[in-house]
Amino acid sequence: MEAIRRSFVVSCAAAVLLALTGGTSFAAARTPAPHAKPCRPARSARCLRKARGPEAVIVSPRGTMSRADALQAFAQTVGPLPGVKPEPGAVDRRMFESLSGPFRWAAAYLKTMTRAQRAAFAKLLNGSGRGRRAHAAANPSPAQVQKWTQAANTAATLLGQHLGVSLFSAPALPLDVTLLTTPDPDSAAAEAAATPVDKNGNWATGLGPGVSCRIQVFPIGWQSSNPDVPIIAVSHEVAHCFQFKLASTAYGTLSASPWLLEGGAEWAGDQVAQEALGHEPHDSGLTNYWNAYLKYPSIGLFTRVYDAVGFFAHLAETAAAGTMWPKLREMFKALGNPAQAYGLAVPDGNLDFLDSWASGYARTPSLGAGWDTTGIGITPAKPPIPLFGGTGNTVASLDAGPRSNALARVNIADQVLAVTSFGGPSFGRLRDANGTTYSLDSSAYCVSGQDCTCPAGTDGFGEQLPTIAPGVAWVALSGNNSATHVTLTRMNASAWCRHPIDYSPPVGTSNITIGGGATGTSYAGGRNDSCTLHQSNPLPPDLYFQCFFEIAEPGSSAIAQLTLATFRYTGPGQYDADTRGTTVWPEVGFTDLANTFDSAQLPQDVNAGGFTITGVSGNMISGTINASMEDVTQPDAANNVAGASGSFTVPLQIAP
């Protein structure tokens, strides 16, 4: 069974710790935990916006959507459902040019809906009941209906040729294109939706006689003056029809794989739209999707929705000729199982994809092959890329979660550069200032122009290190199905000669255990745990402390992060997470990858626990944790409180 990590973070401002570290200088490429204001109540607009991050809607790292969030997405984009109060911040309606996703996500929970909710769903499914506050558009002309029907047939023909399957072969799935006269005022950007329906107009859960793929086009679509819109909009929707054809049971009954269903449909639709138009489609929605993908490489693929189009674009640019469309067809067949679908595309052996996934975010083709990414409608956006410079014995650490990426620049100096990878397989690349590319496997290099010869009598005597150029190097790290970590350590040759093999930072131990709504135990005895003292912090006293504890949760792809933060450190001792004061202000946060919450969301009479700093000695720090946190991404769960407890003694490093 795959051991999936959970990452637990303890943060505390600690000006006095710097003096206790002996002046050792380290740097880490980890992003400091934000000191946000308390998020109360748990499902307020700001809390939900924080949980959703840059995504259109909240999706768990398992690639699924909860019932509450599925009904929220539907109520805020398609139309009202009795008993579902729209929560501002839960959905970014600007990202929904297609309503196929909200229909499908809600349909997955039809059996759990009330009778009134099912009636409202059926009414909206059949194009009635929308736009109670909207003005009805004039009826479309026969020419407009014909134009959109022809666009759908063109897309169906091209997609069928690429995917090797026809909508019209037995069991047939005919297209039914309908131009509606009333839009939903809460989703004015939505142009169309594809929904599988049976002969009675009900949501269809499988192929059969009378079942069709209905494509509803809203006035903002069919009244658009953009001549590209018909083929752009229906190509995406017809791609959904093919998904239903290939995996009808999963499509109709599971709220799973939004990254595959929406990102895959977007990529496939873009390809045939360009074929039909003869040029790249002019699509503002695609621009938004690309920007969301390119600016946030650390977001796990399974939590993405429409912006997963960037993943499929990179998959296509690294696939062997003639293999992308057959691969996409097989992924569509497995859409009910996100891990299986992903594994079909990106096994560990797909090095062409994995070793260039993170580096493509650099968007700098002058660095050479693999340092840019391409795709229809791509924008020039890219993420901020940190530079870790300075001199001395510096460690730059990169961490990539499952199916996510990290990117940094590091100044290579001194005599020896040691690269240490741990955790899951470290895919990616290291490019030195001269343009030479290296793998991220654990290794050591002699900086060009330096003498790295080890004298007789040392452990490194006779070792010949490969060379690497001094100056600014680029490091790109990709995680596949598990979290992965890489550190780059600069050292002098004498240090290397004493320890030519064991050049990794000191290792510690921890016995952090997770309980309550999430279970897990320490990963590898705390082998990969570490703490960082950050020197750049806008809050007094301008330093804060951060620890990362790697926890395995068997059988789950969730990665959680528990954050305990105190803005002012008053010395060793206990810090309660529900305490507020002038000298101590800790907070607790439970993170499900992109979903972050803090202790203020707990009931006032609940003590969220805390942590203790017991001491700092050399490059090691010791302490204990005892904290709990409500997971508001699963408000309907009977037990949605996660807890962390245990002790730790782990390495300490200092970041700029």
Image (cartoon, helix red, strand yellow):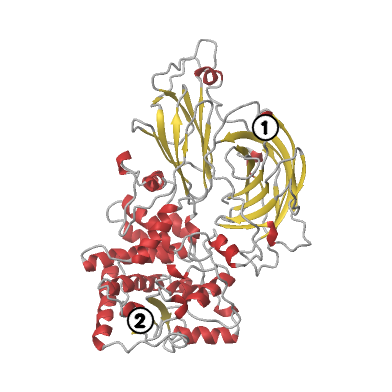
Name the residue at 60% across, 27% down.
24
Q: Earlier in the sequence, mark 2 or mark 1?
A: 2
- Res 136 → quadrant: bottom left
The extreme top residue here reads 456
Distance between mark 2 and mark 1 Cα atoms: 64 Å
- Residue 93 shown left or right of residue 519 in the figure: left
- Asked whether the viewer can see residue 40, the reply is yes
Q: How many marks?
A: 2
- Residue 330 shown left or right of residue 570 in the figure: left
Residue 207 position within the rendered picture, expressed as x and y whole percent measured from the top left: 41, 79
**Of discs 2 and 1, which sits in the foreground?**
2
Marks 2 and 1 close (CB-CB < 8 Å): no
Residue 63 position within the rendered picture, expressed as x and y whole percent measured from the top left: 51, 62
Name the residue at 76% across, 52% down.
579
Quick one: label 1, few (<14), some, or many (20+) residues within 10 Å?
some
Amino acid at circle 2 = Pro
Name the residue at 33% across, 81% down.
174
Disc on res. 620: 1
Residue 594 position within the rendered picture, expressed as x and y whole percent measured from the top left: 55, 56
The extreme left residue here reads 278
Label 2: state its secondary structure. Answer: helix
Amino acid at circle 1 = Met
- Asked whether the viewer can see residue 350, the reply is no
Q: Quadrant of the C terminus?
A: top right
Disc on res. 180: none
Disc on res. 219: 2
Say which of 643 and 12 sits in front.
Answer: 12
